[in-house]
Amino acid sequence: MDLSVELLGLKFENPLGPSAGPLTEGLENMRFFNSNKCGVNVSKTISVLGADVPKPCIAGTTNTIYNCELWSELHSDVWINEILPTIHAEKKKPLIISAGYHEEDFRNLIPKLDPFADIFEISTHYVKENLAGIVRSIRENTDKPVFMKLSPHVIDFLEFTKIVLDAGATGIVAINSLGPGTAIDLKKRSVLLAENIWMSGPSIKPIALHRIYNIRKAYPDIPIIGVGGIGKAEDVLEFMLAGADLVQMLSSALIKGRQLYDKIIKDLPAVLEKYGFSSIEEIRDIRKETVFKDVDTFVDNFPSFNDKCNMCGLCVRICPAGALSAEETIVVDKEKCIHCGLCESRCPQDAIFGVLR
Ligand SMILES: Cc1cc2nc3c(=O)[nH]c(=O)nc-3n(C[C@H](O)[C@H](O)[C@H](O)COP(=O)(O)O)c2cc1C
């Protein structure tokens, strides 16, 4: 099964890479992703000075990572003189260099990072103004593709996209972590980590898909890297159907371990086959005719039941309109049914059809 992706003249063996964060900090971590099965390597966000990160800075639950980490704690000289030359010499796959944050940082940094980068990815997480000026300060110092990374607290993300593209950016990475938020540790009667924390992992996946889908709809031809909540091979397919050309993952690997990258890539062929795709590129080719087609057509259909129904009764218990009852079979009260689709989405047997798109 062909998992490869071609983008901007670069060939990626598969679409998955790490996302900027603690797993891509420093030489040993960068070497790990240079050698594992990922199709692309990504650095931690490099700024001129190393960040002074409040500790502790990462906590996790089954579906969510909370963090108050900043950019790389290493001075940019360490990246430029030691880490990036070593990775470049040992290079096995394209490298995305993440950098931040302000015009003066980029005028200093981009020329020094440029020899090592195939693509630049620019964090805008702490940027409040001058987005266009920031993009121009990068563009003036490199001919490489420049992807601006969208944070989900940017409400007008289409305006963000327009501003950065008009100023010379090549594409978008969506999304950074969600927040700021606060979590309370009930047992310790304190705030978890810090007052302002950022959330990521499977719990933010619908928000990432929303941004990717809507940016793709508005800009059918720009390159998009999707990130936010990926944790299994099925997610990679969903992100690509929604509009991503490449994908990244961090939090699920923090929750389960970094072996997850190779597992997802190993699982991809079987999952592609299960959903009837013959390659990753096929998803990019067909999404215009599938997921972006007729999305505004709504229908009022009643649920139908196939012979997989084992009368478990879940649909009867959860129907918000009280329209289903268990008799010899499940009976639909057509006066009461509101055509919402919940029963079909929740049926454990896949026995209900006809309501959802
Ligand atoms: C601990 C931690 C540190 C992060 N550091 C960075 C960073 O330095 N630069 C950046 O652009 N994004 C950073 N992120 C955001 C991730 O790269 C990613 O966009 C976000 O977590 C959503 O993806 P995920 O759900 O797969 O983790 C960080 C996220 C976490 C959890």
Image (cartoon, helix red, strand yellow):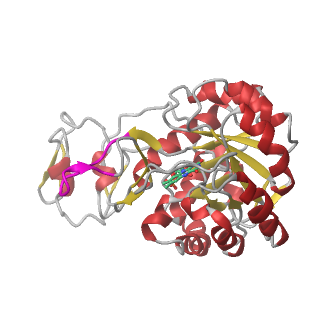
Residue shown at 72% from the left, 40% from the top: 171
Locate the N terminus by quadrant.
bottom right
Residue 254 is situated, as x and y percent measured from the top left of the image, at 47, 65
Foreground pick, 82 / 20: 82
- Find residue 326 and report its image quarter: bottom left
Q: Is residue 219 above or below residue 116?
A: above
Residue 125 is situated, as x and y percent measured from the top left of the image, at 56, 38
Residue 345 is situated, as x and y percent measured from the top left of the image, at 34, 51
Instruction: Please state the total of marks drawn on the protein image.
Output: 0
Residue shown at 60% from the left, 49% from the top: 226
Query: Is residue 329 toward the left or the right of residue 234 in the image?
Result: left
Residue shown at 45% from the left, 42% from the top: 178
Q: Is residue 34 above or below residue 205?
A: below
Residue 79 is situated, as x and y percent measured from the top left of the image, at 73, 58
Let me know if residue 13 appears in the view.
Answer: yes
- Which residues fall within the magenta stretch? 181-192
Locate the C terminus by quadrant.
top left
Q: Is residue 88 above or below residue 150?
A: below
Let me know if residue 277 appears in the view.
Answer: no
Residue shown at 39% from the left, 41% from the top: 196
- Find residue 202 and report its image quarter: bottom left
Residue 230: within the magenta?
no
Foreground pick, 343 / 66: 66
Foreground pick, 95 / 159: 95
- Find residue 28 and report its image quarter: bottom right
